[in-house]
Image (tube, coloured by chain):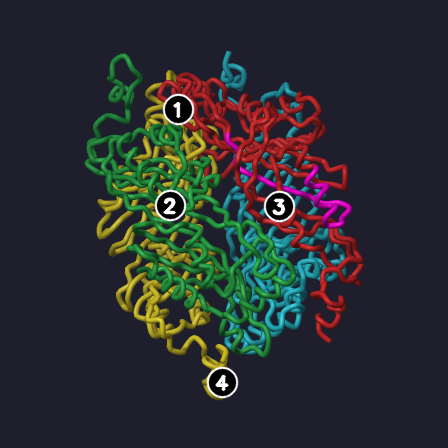
Chain colours: A cyan, B red, C yellow, D green
Amino acid sequence: MNTRDINCLVPNVMPDVQGSRDERELPIHRVGIRGVRYPVAWRGQDGGVQHSVAQFAFSVALPAEQKGTHMSRFHELLESGLGPLDAATLAQLHDRMLERLDANEGTIELSFPFFVSKSAPVSGVSALMDYEVSLRADGPRGAARVALKVLVPVTSLCPCSKSIADYGAHNQRSHVTVTIEGEPMVDAAELVALIEAQASSELYGLLKRVDEKYVTERAYDNPKFVEDLVRDVAASVARLPGVRHYVVEAENFESIHNHSAYARIES
Amino acid sequence: MNTRDINCLVPNVMPDVQGSRDERELPIHRVGIRGVRYPVAWRGQDGGVQHSVAQFAFSVALPAEQKGTHMSRFHELLESGLGPLDAATLAQLHDRMLERLDANEGTIELSFPFFVSKSAPVSGVSALMDYEVSLRADGPRGAARVALKVLVPVTSLCPCSKSIADYGAHNQRSHVTVTIEGEPMVDAAELVALIEAQASSELYGLLKRVDEKYVTERAYDNPKFVEDLVRDVAASVARLPGVRHYVVEAENFESIHNHSAYARIES
Amino acid sequence: MNTRDINCLVPNVMPDVQGSRDERELPIHRVGIRGVRYPVAWRGQDGGVQHSVAQFAFSVALPAEQKGTHMSRFHELLESGLGPLDAATLAQLHDRMLERLDANEGTIELSFPFFVSKSAPVSGVSALMDYEVSLRADGPRGAARVALKVLVPVTSLCPCSKSIADYGAHNQRSHVTVTIEGEPMVDAAELVALIEAQASSELYGLLKRVDEKYVTERAYDNPKFVEDLVRDVAASVARLPGVRHYVVEAENFESIHNHSAYARIES
Amino acid sequence: MNTRDINCLVPNVMPDVQGSRDERELPIHRVGIRGVRYPVAWRGQDGGVQHSVAQFAFSVALPAEQKGTHMSRFHELLESGLGPLDAATLAQLHDRMLERLDANEGTIELSFPFFVSKSAPVSGVSALMDYEVSLRADGPRGAARVALKVLVPVTSLCPCSKSIADYGAHNQRSHVTVTIEGEPMVDAAELVALIEAQASSELYGLLKRVDEKYVTERAYDNPKFVEDLVRDVAASVARLPGVRHYVVEAENFESIHNHSAYARIES
């Protein structure tokens, strides 16, 4: 007797293989789809909406006795109309997913490029800078915890190099990543600004010569080890109202080595 | 007064900026280096040694009062002579790292391509197949937990597609990933074989026509949802002697969609 | 005498290092910026505009006697207002770049996720499918050649496997990539549809059970080697009016191997 | 009549679908396999052999009248014994491929991590540095042109930043890539050293404090635009005896922007 015989006994319709009973008695922690690219509109706390393209992953818990989930329903969720996303509407989407999939708990994750218009520090010319924003809604129906994560590229300048050298100091691009959970949720653009304020210097899309002089000197005046970066950012994040949990990471793509320096603080 | 004045009071030597006292009172969970490529010799349980190239990450915990770690000591660890690596020698390396960095706990991670010579199922022609093996030693001095992870590419064939179609069934390459912790540690090659036995079909580097007929029919005879893959692999892994903890994941790069199906079981 | 002394003799302004004379007598084929993420609006031939996020690269030729280009002007080009992009406005952007950089020739490249709303073949439910579209404008001022490239994921089903097996046939996701140059330029959505028509089956974001039956059987009825894919797509592309040059590539992520089959035809 | 009827008329054996006649009259420029990971032993000009793991791609031209190539023969080539590879043995492998595939022309490409033991500039401590080496043998039987490519990570320090700032200068990791064709072929390790000599500073796996002082000051003493990097490296490469063709590229992962500066010179 093949799979077809076992699973296809639903009369008058196509066989519902996934709906049949499973005998292995192993619940599945998460099952769903990932690697789904889809347009999103992201709403900031000022109400403005930004168009981007996100990578989505959707998954739910599957009880031991259920053979499979209904994969097509995850994509139907996207097609049913996302509307502008923010922390609140993502929590609603999470609820709709669990209801539609008839599941007790699950996870939605998405990440997308996010743009902030910044003014150069001296000339004031404005240009877009790109960041990577990720959101994650996880947990049971009606009680999803939403986490916000931003990846912020910055300049780090090495205090040791500055200290021991007669002139100059090695510096490089670094990625600072902050994940926060809490209530109310901080705005992504605010979180970016908070992180940039702690770097040796922030980055810009466009710099005129007077700006380049400024950021060069600012970084030299403001040396930070990868340890300083995570500590200074963590201290700032910890002061945000309503933050329940945070993770701060920094990775320096060292200009004197072919590897990175890395540090992480978790609350 | 610049950083140099503050930090460089070690007489007669170069300033030891990292060794100075930190005032922010934030311990750092992990700090170290990552993205380090280095040749490795991996020793299987049969004693045979395989040359490969690994990506390494080393990190340690840093107490609140210490300003920085000594980054160069991580790379010195590699240069001091790795010798053939296995679970036991990795634990020794972890001890040496904590001693050299004067740290209470830390993590070593590495991953590398790993090859198994396999015989085609009918013709018997042999060829190398490549897998990705990762190791992680984590925890306090003298008590590191070592985890082994293998990523095994397999064929999955969809039971629903087989069941509802008059002929054919969609199938695709899938990645099954198993992470185990325990004692004694299973051999990477054995873990690969255990996983492959649960797939719709295993993959091969080289197949003659008679073998292609065999694997095509084997996959069709053996349909598995992504949920079946993780359950069947988890059931096998759970029966391994000495396994304390496992995570089983599967990702099907669906041949009918541009996204993946994904499932995960954790013990 | 340091670089500063040599290069900074422009009175009353910041030194213009890049504008100074180079003595090595080596022209530079292309110099510019790459890895720039920026929002784009892409205009199809139906006039509809789609928001996406592109990766840009801009570069120009630099004569032997010129020390450097003015990097900030490339980003200024983006900030000066892109407007909805299509082949014609990209050629205009190319002209503006050469004028602003005072260069004789140069290249603009961009690629971005592109979405098409498709109806499932039997149920008719509609869903977005994602593709990767790239554009390249290259050459001298006023005479840029514009090339359009689309990467289309499809299903390929192996004729040999079907032929030799008593039942089933291995199949997998494949990437078909077509690059065309010509006048008038075909629409990206039309080019996608033309490619999909030549695959064993096309992919969909969302399939109901009746659709999954259809695509399974369609792929089985329509087996194609990687060689067939590139030949059938090339034959279709060659019949497009106004195509001057094309490249057709296909890569099958084989479901029975851990490597790809690949083929390429160039006109 | 399905594919099976048409293609499977070879008596007493499995059907030879690929060997049958094609009617579309389109030759295929290249067809083969790619994404094949395999262990390699690379032989330097000093005779020393280095173990690594390569990514291979093999392809051949297919005449218009031939339906398909024999994919399994490419992997057989690997299994038949690679031996230590260098430019000469790669050309022999290319010949064997064309003979075994019965093809007039074809291409073999491979790339792998390559290690050089370097001494730190002041302390003299030695450590491995990793580079990416690629080889390509392309063309007709008995007359393959072999190209060698190395990717060398270096430090670049911006002359403009140094010139306009009162102190400090932005610097970053850069990738310099050189591809050369010629006879006799230069050694990969020599080519790496030649490139490093032209950078603001070279990178090291391991640096003590005295070395960090040295490389910091060396980079500051030796500022280079991305244009300078490609010109200075091109001038060095052009002086190598026997070089027929070269391409020099540099990409600076700018520490003050979130994008790269890029330049290319082709002979």
Q: Is residue B216 above or below residue A45?
A: above
Q: Amino acid at mark 4?
A: Val
Q: Is residue D245 left or right of residue B30?
A: left
Give the chain letter at badge 1. B
Q: Amino acid at mark 2?
A: Leu
Question: In the rendered image, which residue does mark 2 sit on?
Answer: D135
Query: Is the same chain shared between marks 3 and 1?
Result: yes
SS class of the residue under badge 2?
Answer: strand
- Establish whether labels 2 and 1 are both on one chain: no
Q: Which residue is mark 1?
A: B207
> Which residues fall within the magenta stretch?
B92-115
Q: Are marks 1 and 4 in contact (CB under 8 Å)?
A: no
**Quarter where residue A142 is shown:** top right
Question: Same chain for the residues at labels 2 and 3, yes or no?
Answer: no
Q: In this figure, which residue is indicated by the disc labeled 3? A: B78
Q: Which residue is mark 4?
A: C13
Using the image as rendered, state which of residue A37 and residue D106 is in the foreground. D106
Which of the two discs, 2 and 3, sits closer to the camera? 3
**Disc 4/disc 3 C-alpha distance (Å):** 50 Å
| Chain letter belonging to callout 2 | D
Is C260 situated left or right of A8 in this image?
left
Q: Is residue D84 above or below residue C24?
A: above
| Residue D93 quadrant | top left
Neighbours of disc 4 within 10 Å: few (<14), some (14-19), many (20+): few
Assess whether mark 3 and mark 4 are in contact (beta carbons under 8 angstroms). Answer: no
Indicate the amino acid at tag 1.
Leu
Q: Nearer the viewer, mark 2 or mark 4?
A: 2
Q: Is residue C121 magenta?
A: no
Return the chain for callout 4: C
Q: Tell me the residue at 57%/69% (across/down).
A: D217
